[in-house]
Image (tube, helix red, strand yellow):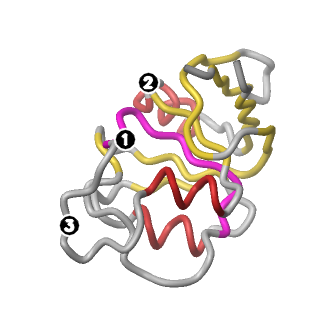
Amino acid sequence: MSTARIIFEDGTEARGLAYGARGTVSGRVVVCSSATGYEQALRDSAGAIVLVTTPHVGNTGLTGEGPLTAAGLIARDPVPRSSSAFAVAELEERLRADGVVGIREVDTRAIMRRVRGGTTTLTIVSEEN
């Protein structure tokens, strides 16, 4: 498994596992608190890092067309396969195809507290091991 880390504005880090594309991205944080709204957030948040606050993401897969424009995704526990008959793509496949760097298995609640406390930009470093 490949590792990834989030670097906060003050230099502290949170570690997790790589998800989606590999690379390094920085951007403003956009919060998605909807269980099924992650697809829209990833399409409408050009250059941003989407923080999904629900524990699971990817349950409905991707149903729309067009590229994901977000730079990054932070998720606690993405599902490996969607359960929707309407899904045309799995989340991780599409993140890779569209170059969206992600991190999973991090404490999204703690990250959300930092965002509420004033953190506005983050960097995700996703490495190939």
CA gap, disc 2 and disc 1: 13 Å
Q: What range is drawn magenta here? A: 69-79
**Which sits earlier in the primary sequence, circle 2 or circle 1?**
1
CA gap, disc 3 and disc 1: 15 Å
Report x, y in % for residue 53: 38, 44
Position of the N terminus, as image quadrant, is top right
**Residue at horizontal 72 percent and vertical 39 percent from the top:** 22
Write down the residue under mark 3: 84
Write down the residue under mark 1: 78
The reply to whether the magenta stretch includes residue 31 is no
Residue flagged by tag 3: what amino acid is it?
Ser
Relative to 17, say whether 37 is above or below.
Answer: below
Relative to 52, say whether 70 is above or below.
Answer: below
Q: Residues within 10 Å of mark 2 (few under 14, many from 20)?
A: some
Q: Residues within 10 Å of mark 1 (few under 14, many from 20)?
A: many
Write down the residue under mark 2: 107
SS class, disc 3: loop
Q: Residues within 10 Å of mark 3 (few under 14, many from 20)?
A: few
Relative to 83, say whether 56 is above or below.
Answer: above
Report x, y in % for residue 64: 43, 81
Frontmost residue, 120 versus 73: 73
